[in-house]
Image (cartoon, rainbow, N blue to C red):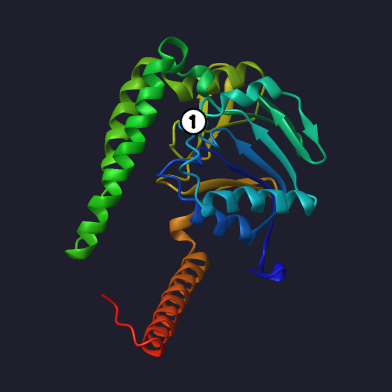
Amino acid sequence: MKKSNKRKVEIVVISDVHLGTYGSKAKELLNYLKSIEPEKLILNGDIIDIWQFNKRYFPKSHMNVIKQITSLLSKNTTVYYITGNHDEMLRKFKGFKLGNFKIVNKLTFNLQGKKAWFFHGDVFDVTMKHSKWLAKLGGKGYDLLILINTFFNWLSGLLGYGKFSFSKKIKNSVKGAVKFINDFEKTATDIAIDNGYDYVICGHIHQPEIRVFENQKGKTTYLNSGDWIENLTALEYNNKEWSLYEYSKDETLKAISKKKKKKNKEKLKENEILFNELLKEFNLNKS
C-alpha cells in the first residue's frame, strides 16, 4: 500500500496474534499493519506463541508480520512489546530497549490529561495462577479446534453454506464460566479505579470491547483489543478518542485482499500454461 494511502494513528494496540499457530490470521494482520502509520504500536501480549512454538510451522506470512513491525520501527514508530502468558519467556527481558523497541510487563501513559494502564491480563486469570499446565493443554486443544473448524468451513463453503465458528462458541461458553469465577473485567476495572486510571487496556481473553465500568469509588473505561485468530480486531487512539477497529468491516482492505487473491490465481494459471508449453517442447506428457 502506498504511503500516501496510509492512515495516521496516534496509538494502535493489538494482542493475541499467536504467530506460530495454525489459527493465526497473519495475512489479514499484515494487510492491516501495511494500511496504518502509527506513532505508537503496543503489542499487548501473546504476539508469538512460544508455548506452542514449532520450527516446522512458522510460515512466510507469520514472518512477514515481524518484518512489517520492524519496518514500522525504521519509520520512527515506537513499539512496546508487553509480555503475555504465551510469550512469558520474554518476561526475563523486561526493560530491554533497542532504539524505538521496548519490552515491558505493563505500561502507563498520560493521554491528554487522562491516565492509561496497559497490560496483557493473564495476571488475573485463575487458570494461569493455579493450573498453568491446564492452560497450556487448553491452548493446544484450541489450536486443534481451529484446524478442525478451518476444514469444516472449507467443506461448508463447497456445499454453499456459510461459515460457523465452533471454537468461538465453545470459547465464549468457557470464558463465561471462567468470568463467573474470576470476573476478569471487574477485577481489572476495580483495580484501575482504585489507582485512578481513566483507561485500562487488556488483551488475553480474546473478547474485543470498549465499555465504561463504574463502582462506588469512581469509573474507568475498559478496553480489550481482542485477537487475530477469530475477531481480527485492534484498538486505535486518535484525537482524544478510542475506537475498535474490525477487519471484517474494513471494505478497503477486503477489496485489496480479493485483488491479491485474483492476481495470485492468474499467476498460478500463467505458470501452469508455461509449464505445459515446456512439456510440449520436450515431448513429455503430464502423468
Q: Residue furthest top?
A: 130
Whether residue 163 is visible, yes or no, is no
**Quadrant in the picture for residue 147:** top left
**Toward the viewer: 211 or 62?**
62
Q: Crowdedness of circle 1 by 10 Å Cα count: few (<14), some, many (20+)?
A: many
Image coordinates of residue 79 in percent, x first then y, are 72, 41
Q: Is residue 173 left or right of residue 240?
A: left
Q: Secondary structure at mark 1?
A: loop
User: Residue at (63%, 26%) from the top-left corner?
Assistant: 90
Image coordinates of residue 52 in percent, x first then y, are 45, 32
User: Residue at (64%, 22%) from the top-left corner?
Assistant: 91
- Number of numbered discs overlaid on the protein picture: 1
Q: Is residue 218 left or right of residue 208?
A: right
| Three-letter amino acid code of the residue under disc 1 | His
User: Residue at (68%, 70%) from the top-left corner?
Assistant: 2
Q: Residue furthest front?
A: 283
Q: Is residue 136 above or below residue 18?
A: above
User: Residue at (26%, 57%) from the top-left corner?
Assistant: 154
**Quadrant in the picture for residue 276:** bottom left
Q: Is residue 132 left or right of residue 161?
A: right
Q: Residue furthest right?
A: 99
**Toward the viewer: 58 or 284?**
284
**Toward the viewer: 48 or 227?**
48
Whether residue 269 is visible, yes or no, is yes
> Looking at the rendering, in which quadrant would you find the N terminus?
bottom right
Image coordinates of residue 66 in percent, x first then y, are 62, 47
Q: Is residue 34 above or below residue 91?
A: below
Circle 1 residue: 204
Image coordinates of residue 222 in percent, x first then y, are 54, 32
> Looking at the rendering, in which quadrant would you find the C terminus?
bottom left
**Quadrant in the picture for residue 134:** top left
